[in-house]
Amino acid sequence: MRWSVTIGSFKGTAVRIHVTFLLLLGWIGFAAYQRGGAVAARDSILFIVAIFVCVVLHEFGHILTARRYGIVSPVITLLPIGGVADMDRMPEKPGQELLIALAGPAVNLVIAIALIAFLGAVDVSDAIQIGDPSVNLLKRLAAVNVFLAAFNLIPAFPMDGGRVLRAALSIWIGKGRATRIAAQIGQGFAFLLGFLGLFGNPLLLFIAIFVYIAAAGEAQMTTMSEAARGLKAADAMETRIAVIDRGSTVREAIDILLATSQDEFPVVDAARRLSGFLSRANIIEALRDSDPGAPIAPFVRQEPATIGVGDTVDAALPSLTGGDVIGVLDGDGRFLGLLTRQSLTEIMMIKDVRPDWRFSPRDDSPRTVA
Ligand SMILES: [Zn+2]
C-alpha cells in the first residue's frame, strides 16, 4: 500500500504504518492536549499505541497460523480502521481457514485474560469507560481486547467471523454454497449495522457499507472461481460477436457499434490475427478526434490479453472479474472468441441450476457485421 512506512519486521513479515494512521495519532494527541495538557496528550497517545500493538498481535495470530500451512504474509499495514495482512493466497481446506480466522480473535482474548489476571478483579462498569483517561489504562486495554475479539467474530465478511462461518459451512455443503450463505448473512448484518448507525453512531453506517461491499465481492469472487475451475476457454468463450477489421475507417467502426450492443470489439487483420480491442468509448473518441473517413487503427488498444483455446480459464479469472476482456486464440494465433465477465456469469448461472452441465463445442465463428 502506498503512503506507508515500515517500522519493523518479525519472522519475515514487515509491519508498516499508513500515513493516515500517524495523522490520527497526531490528531488524538492534539485534542487531548487542548483538554488536559501534556500529560493527557501523552496518555491518550500511549493508549492508542497500546491498542494498535494488540491489533498487530491479532494479525500475527492469523499470520503465524497461516504459516503452518505454508501461506506467507510479507506485510501487515496499520490503517486507522485496523490492521490488514496481505496473504499470498487463502487455504483451500476449510479446517485450515477456520483455524487461521479464529487465531486473531483468540489472541485478543488471551491478552484480555492475561490483563484481568494481572489486575485482579476488573470492574466492568469501570473498564468500559475506554474514553475516560482517569480509569487505569490496563483496565481499559482489557476492555478493548474483549471488544476487538467480539467485533471481529461478527459473522460477516470481511470480519474474521465471516470466514469462520464460511469455513464451518464449507465442511458440510462445499465452498461455493457456503460462501453465498455466509455473504447473505453478512449483508443482513450490514443492514442491521446500518440501521443502528442511522439512529446512533454514524461510524456504524460507514462500517455497514464496508461490510456490505466486502461480502458481495467475496461471494462473487468465490462463486466465479468455483464455476470456472477446470473450465476450458473453448467452453466459456463468446463466439457470436462482431469484430472490426484492422483496415476499417472510423465510419465503418461506428456502423458496427450501432449494429450491436457489445462493449468491446476485437480488431483483427486479414489473417484473423487479433491486433487489439476497441471499446465503445474508444470508437466515440476516434469520431471526436479524427475524420469519419480516417483509419480506426490508431485508436486500437494494442497488446491485447489472450488465452489459448485449450487453456483453462482459472488463471485469467482475476483480470476477468476486474472487467477486462480476453481474446481466445487457436494454435496459429487466429482469433476465435472472447472471454468476458458476462460469459463467466452465464456459466455460473447454468452451473447453479445444473451442476453437471456439459458444455458442447460451438462452431460459430465470429462475424463482421457490415
Ligand atoms: Zn482478524
Image: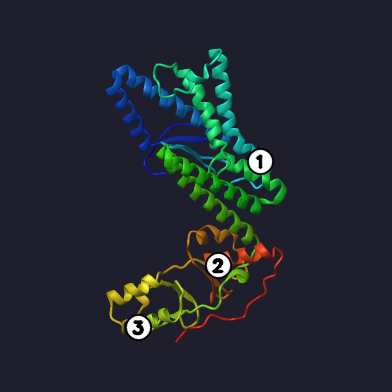
Q: Residue furthest top?
A: 120
Q: Is residue 187 visible?
A: yes
The quarter of the picture where the C terminus appears is: bottom left
Residue pointed to by mark 1: 96
Q: Secondary structure at mark 2?
A: strand
Q: Residue at x 63, y 43 (%)?
A: 165
Q: Residue at x 30, y 27 (%)?
A: 31
Foreground: 201 or 149? Answer: 201
Q: Is residue 67 visible?
A: no
- In the rendering, at what x and y percent does residue 229 appear? 64, 59
Q: Which mark is residue 251?
A: 3
User: Contact, CB < 8 Å: mark 3 with mark 2?
Assistant: no
Residue at mark 1 to residue at mark 2: CA–CA distance: 33 Å
Amino acid, disc 1: Gln
Q: Secondary structure at mark 1?
A: helix
Q: Secondary structure at mark 3?
A: helix
Residue at mark 1 to residue at mark 3: CA–CA distance: 58 Å
Above or below 116: residue 171: below
Which sits earlier in the primary sequence, circle 1 or circle 3? 1
| Foreground tag (3 vs 2) | 3
Amino acid, disc 3: Arg
Which sits earlier in the primary sequence, circle 3 or circle 2? 3
Residue pointed to by mark 2: 307
Q: Residue furthest bottom?
A: 370
Q: Residues within 10 Å of mark 2 (few under 14, many from 20)?
A: many
Residue at mark 3 to residue at mark 2: CA–CA distance: 30 Å
Quadrant observed for ligand 1 in the rendered image: top right
